[in-house]
Image: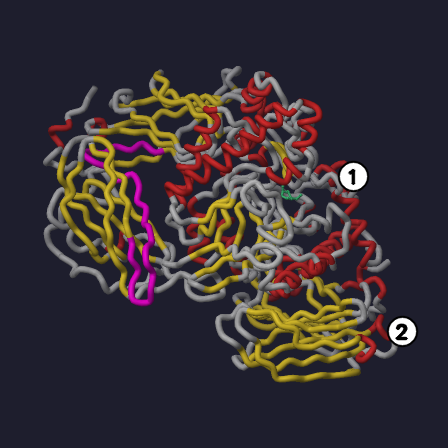
Amino acid sequence: MKKIAWLFIFIPMITCSCRKTNVMTEIRLHDNWEFRNIEEEEWLPASVPGCVHTDLLANGKIEDPYWRLNEHEQQWIDKTDWEYRTIFRVSGEMLEKDRVELFFGGLDTYADVILNDTLILTADNMFREWQADVSNVLEPGENVLRICFHSPVKVGLVKLGGLGYKFPDPPNDLSEIGGLGDKKVSMFIRKAGYHFGWDWGPRFVTSGIWKEVVLRAWDVARIDNLFIQQGELSESKAELTANLEIRSTRETSLTLTGLVNGSEVLSRQVKLAAGANTIRENFTIAEPELWWPNGLGEQSLYNIKFILSNGASMGAPDRASEKSSAEAPERSSEVAPVRSSNRAPVVSEISARIGLRTIEVVQEPDKEGKSFFFRVNGRPVFMKGANYIPQDAFLDRVTPERYRHILQSAADANMNMLRVWGGGIYEKDLFYDLCDEKGILVWQDFMFACSMYPGDGPFLENVRQEAVDNVKRLRNHPCIALWCGNNECLSGWYYWKWKETTEKTQGREVADAIWKAYEDNYHRVLPEVVARYDPGKFYWSSSPSAGMGIPENRVSGDVHYWGVWWGKEPFTTYRTLKCRFMSEYGFQSFPELNTIRKFALEEDWDIFSDVMKSHQRSSIGNGTIEYYMLQDYRKPKDFPMFLYVGQVLQAEGTRVAMEGHRKNMPWCMGSLFWQIDDCWPVASWSTIDYYGNWKAQHYFARKAYRDILISPQIDGDTASVWVVSDRREDAAAKMELRLMDFDGNILWTNSSDIVVPANASRRHFTSPVPAIVPDLAQRDNILLDCSLRTVDGQQYGNILYFKPVKDLELPRPDIEWTLEGDGSGLKLVIRTDKLAKNVYLSADDPDVFFYDNYFDILPRDKVEIMIRPGPAMDKEDIESKLSLISLVDSYL
Ligand code: BMA
C-alpha cells in the first residue's frame, strides 16, 4: 500500500527512542483498551495485558472472585463471548518500513483479531505466540484493533459433541462448579489446565490478552531468534555456536557483529537471501566462569548480543544498553580489540543471557533398576525443591514483585530446583531470568496434566507449534534442566484405570485411539521438537514414569508418592519408601488467620463450613488434615489454634520426607515437594500462601535443605543420627548429642570429631534406644539434641523426640523476649526456662517477616531471630503487635 522502501535503503530512519541507530520501531499497544460483553452495547475500560475477570472486577461489575463463595456465581463469564478494542495512531514513517507486524505474546484462547475491519489472524492456543503482517492493513493516523474472544467453554462443548467417543474423566476439571454437569472440555482446549479448577484451585475459565501486544516495523532484515549452543566446555574455554534466524526482505549483504559482555568477538559480512536465512557462527569464551545451581557456586551469566548493521563494524558497544538484572562477569579473554570508530547503522539486533554449565540426567542400570540423577558440571547434584503452580488464577495479577518474592523464597530455602508443573503455563520470561540468577534449575513440563488429550492432525500441529514457540523462547536459559512431556497422564492411563475402563465401556478400538494420541503427543511430536530446537537437552516423556511409556516404579525414573495423604499412610513411610527421584509428595495445611480473613467472615471459621469447604478443593481435604492431626497432636482448642497446629503438622510431617530423601542419597537424588505456592487463598499443600506468607513448612524446608543436614531418627528400638552433605568438599566437624529432659537436666552426652564426606549421606551414630534411655516411663519428657559444628564455624542442629507429640508431657514454659535494634534490623531475643515447642511468632501483619518461626527452644536456652518490619514500622510498632505462643497454648 504505502511502502516506499527505496527511500530507506541508504537513509536509515531514526524512529526508535531507545537506540538512535536503530531502523526498527516497536510500540507496545497497551493503552486505551475497552471491552464489552459481545451481546451488550456498553464498553468499559480494560487493562492489557489482562483478562476479563480482572477487568470486570475493576469496573465494579463483579465482586472479588476469591471472597467467600463468589466463584460459584461467576461461572457465566466463561460462557460469554467478549470483545476488546483499542484505537491507536500510526505515523506515516512507520508505514514506510518494509514490514509492519503485529505481535501477540499470548491470547487466551479462541480469538479473532480484526484490524480496521480486516481479520488478520485467528488464535486457538493460549500458549502460542501470534504474529501477522499488517503492512497492508494499517492506515496512517487512527487504527482500530478489535479482538473477539469466543467462550472457551462453548468451543469445548462443540468439540466434545463432535468427538464420537469419550475421554476418561480428568479428575481436576471441576465441570460441576462450571454448571456443565459431567461434561469435561478442558482437554480440547490449549489453555492452562488449572483454569478449569484443580484440587487446590478455583474454576475461572477466563479470556483475554494475557501477554504483550507489540507493533513492530523494520527495514531490510530482522534477527528473529538467537540460540546459543554450547559445545566443549573446559577450564580454558567454552566453545559456542550462535544460531541466528534472520528474515530479509531482499538479497543483501550486511555486517554481523557478535559481542560477549559488550566486547566484540566476531564481525563479518553476511550475505542474506530474500526470505528466511539461518546463520551459524562459532566463537569461544576463554577461561569461562561456570554457572552453578544454588548452594554449589556462583551463577555466572554472560550477555551475548548480535547486531546486523549496514557498515563495516559496530565499533564500541554502548555499555549502558547491556541491560541485565544480574551482574555478569566482566572477563572474557578471547575478545577482539574493541573498535571505537565507524559506528554503523544498526539494522537489527538481538540479545541473550546465557550461563555455561553442563547438565545431564544419568540413568545407569544397576541391580535393581536404573539411577535417575542430574549431573551438573560433572558432579552429581541432589535436587532440593518444590513444584510450582501459577501464582494466580488471573495471571495479570502476578507482578514482578511476586515473582521475585517466590523465587527469592525458593533460594532462601536452599532450593536448587523447581518443577514448572504441566497444568499451569509456560512461565513468563522473568520467572526464568530469576531462576538463572538464583541458581534454581527448572524441571519444565509441557502443559499437559492429569488427562488424555486429542491426537488429531490439527491438534498435534497446534501442540507442535506451541512447543516450538516455548522451546525457542526458553532454551538459552541455563536454568532449564529438562523438558517433560506431561504430568501424570501415563499414571492416569494405567494406575487410575483409564485404559481398563475405556476398554470395558467403549471397546478396544477407542482405547487404542486414545493411546495412539498419547504416543503421538509425548513420544513423537514433543521429543522431535526438543531434539530439533534444543538438541542435547534431556526429554522425559511423563512425570512420573520409569521411561517412555513405562509407568512409574520405585527402582527407575521419578515418583509421585501420595501414600501419605491420599493413602493415609504414616509420615514415616516417607523415609522407608525408596525411590530414585521424588518429584511430588506433600501434605496440606490452611493458611494463617490473616489470609483466612481475606476470604471468610468470622462466622465461616469452621473447617466444615461452606466457605471453608469451598476454599479446600481436595475431595478428602479437611477430614484428612484432621485425621492426621489427631494421630500426632492434641485437639486444638479453637479455630485459630487449629490453623497453627495444622501448619506445624504439615511441616513436621513433610520434614520426614525432605530429610529422609536426602538420607537415602545416592539411591534417591531428588526431593521436590508439592507445592511451593498458591493461586488463591485456600487450604492446600503450599508452603507459601497466596499473599506470600511463609507457612511453617517453608521454614522447615530451609533447614532440611541446608548444605549439611544432621538428622536423627528412630527405627523400632534403634536410634541413629545421620549427616548428609551436599558440599563440594569434605568437612571436618564436631558432632554433639545431648539427651535432656524438658527442664534442661542433661542425662547423657556423646561428642565426636567426624569428617563429613562431600556429597554423601552417612550414619554417624547408632544405638539401641534402651542404652541411652533406660527408663521407658521417661520417654514422654526427654529429647535428643543433635548438633554439628563444622570447622568453618557453621552450626547445624536437629531434635529427636521419643514419642508422638500428643503423648509428650510438654511443660508450660516461662518465655521472655526482648526486641533489640532499630527499624532497619530488629533482633528478637527469646529465653525460656523449659522446653518451648514450635514457638510461633506473629505480628498480625503480613508485612512483618520473621527469619525463623515455628521452632523449638531448648530448656534454659536463648535464641535470636531477625525481623524485617513492614514499611514505616518501628520497634514500638512491632513490640505492640508481637504475639508469641508455643504448642501448649493450643491445648484445651
Ligand atoms: C499431583 C499433582 C496435581 C495435584 C497434586 C495434589 O499429583 O500433579 O495434579 O494437585 O497431586 O493432589
Q: Nearer the viewer, mark 1 or mark 2?
A: 2
Q: Which residue lies at the image location 61% right of the left edge and 65% below the top edge?
A: 703
Where's residue 794, x and y in %?
56, 76
List the single residue furthest toward the right.
777
Where's residue 439, x and y in %?
46, 58
Quarter in which the C terminus is drawn: bottom right
User: Is disc 1 surrounded by few (<14), some (14 to 19) or many (20+) residues within 10 Å?
Assistant: few
488, above or below 93, in the image:
below
List the single residue furthest toward the front.
367
Residue 728 has which mark? Answer: none
Please indicate whether residue 1 sits to the left or right of residue 419 in the image: left
21, above or below 358, in the image:
above
- Residue range (magenta): 214-240
Snapshot quadrant of residue 799: bottom right
- State whether residue 818 appears in this view: no
Q: Amino acid at mark 2?
A: Ala
Quarter in which the N terminus is drawn: top left
Snapshot quadrant of residue 203: top right
Judging from the image, what secondary structure is the residue with disc 2 in? helix
Q: Please, what is the dominant secondary structure of the magenta stretch?
A: strand
**Precedes in sequence: disc 1 or disc 2:** 1
- As for residue 251 lying within the magenta part, the answer is no
313, above or below 749, in the image:
above
Mark 1 → mark 2, Cα distance in angstroms: 41 Å
Q: Dividing the image into four equal quarters, which quarter contains ligand 1?
A: top right
Q: Amino acid at mark 1?
A: Ser
Q: State the residue position of label 1.
A: 609
Q: State the residue position of label 2.
A: 777
